[in-house]
Image: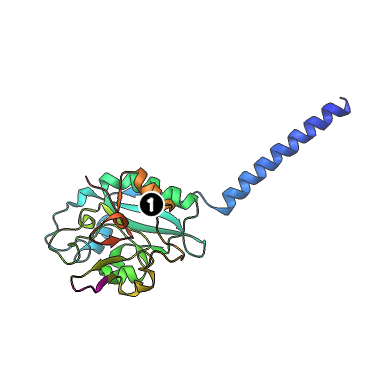
């Protein structure tokens, strides 16, 4: 075999080895992750009783799914969290959170709101991303989209609910989120129209509370079914 042919073979072999090494390194750097939807086990359903699933809840257990999701926390570490959603959006959320994980999108915490006794304020102050919780819209008697498991609140501390009262004062939830109500400021984890999460949720047919006019709910994505 002449030297020219040998050189070409060697170069191609080295290139293939480099590609394989890079693929292996990427796989090591970020595991494939877990993205799964299951029906509610007895243990999970019992955990929800009197919390996110109170007495009188009109949503049937069979309508809900427990999602197990990998995500990257604010330190870049891979974590696994859980949230309960309506089965109608389970695949949407799996697709969205898989892509967020693949792109290393930072999420501080994903945990069942029952870990906070279904106290939305406590959950938001912990910057917990959640979905199903049978409750009414703040300041009204209308059931929230969360009550049907059709809404997700993402990184709520940096993306608060903000509403101006008739006297000009502001309602801010969580109450610790006042540093983040000025959306003209630059800060980490702020959801905007350019944000990956916004683009993914919109692609899957969700609306964003940041686009509402009577109030702003920057953490909130919901699907109208």
Tell whether 104 sits left or right of 220: right
Is residue 40 at all visible to an observer of this figure?
A: no
Q: Residues within 10 Å of mark 1 (few under 14, many from 20)?
A: some
Residue sitting at x 34%, y 45% = 92
Q: Specify the quadrant that holds the N terminus.
A: top right
- The residue beneath circle 1 is 198
Residue sitting at x 58%, y 53% = 29
Determine the image quadrant of residue 6: top right
Q: In front here: 213 or 4?
A: 213
Give x and y (percent) for residue 78. 49, 59
Tell whether 4 sits left or right of 118: right
Is residue 13 at all visible to an observer of this figure?
A: yes
Name the magenta segment's main secondary structure: loop
Residue sitting at x 35%, y 73% = 178
Q: Specify the quadrant that holds the C terminus.
A: top left
Q: In front here: 147 or 217?
A: 217
* Magenta stretch, residue numbers: 167-171
Q: Most extreme residue toward the top, as rendered?
A: 1
Task: Please tell me whether residue 107 belongs to the stretch shown in magenta.
Answer: no
Q: In front here: 136 or 208?
A: 208
Report the number of numbered marks.
Answer: 1
């Amino acid at each position: 075999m002449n030297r020219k042919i040998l050189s070409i073979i060697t170069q191609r072999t080295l290139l293939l080895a480099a590609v394989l090494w890079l693929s292996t390194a990427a796989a090591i750097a970020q595991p494939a992750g877990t993205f799964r939807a299951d029906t509610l086990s007895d243990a999970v359903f019992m955990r929800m009783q009197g919390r996110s699933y109170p007495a009188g809840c009109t949503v049937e257990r069979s309508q809900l799914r427990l999602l197990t999701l990998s995500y990257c926390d604010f330190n870049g570490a891979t974590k696994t969290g859980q949230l309960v959603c309506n089965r109608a959006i389970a695949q949407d959320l799996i697709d969205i959170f898989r892509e967020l994980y693949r792109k290393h999108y930072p999420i501080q915490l994903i945990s069942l709101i029952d870990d906070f006794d279904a106290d939305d304020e406590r959950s938001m102050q912990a910057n917990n991303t959640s979905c199903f919780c049978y409750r009414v819209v703040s300041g009204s008697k209308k059931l929230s989209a969360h009550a049907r498991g059709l809404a997700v609140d993402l990184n709520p501390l940096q993306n608060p609910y903000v509403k101006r009262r008739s006297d000009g004062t502001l309602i801010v939830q969580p109450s610790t989120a006042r540093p983040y109500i000025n959306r003209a400021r630059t800060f980490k984890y702020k959801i905007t129209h350019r944000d990956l999460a916004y683009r993914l949720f919109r692609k899957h047919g969700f609306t964003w509370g940041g686009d509402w006019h009577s109030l702003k709910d920057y953490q909130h994505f919901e699907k109208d079914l």
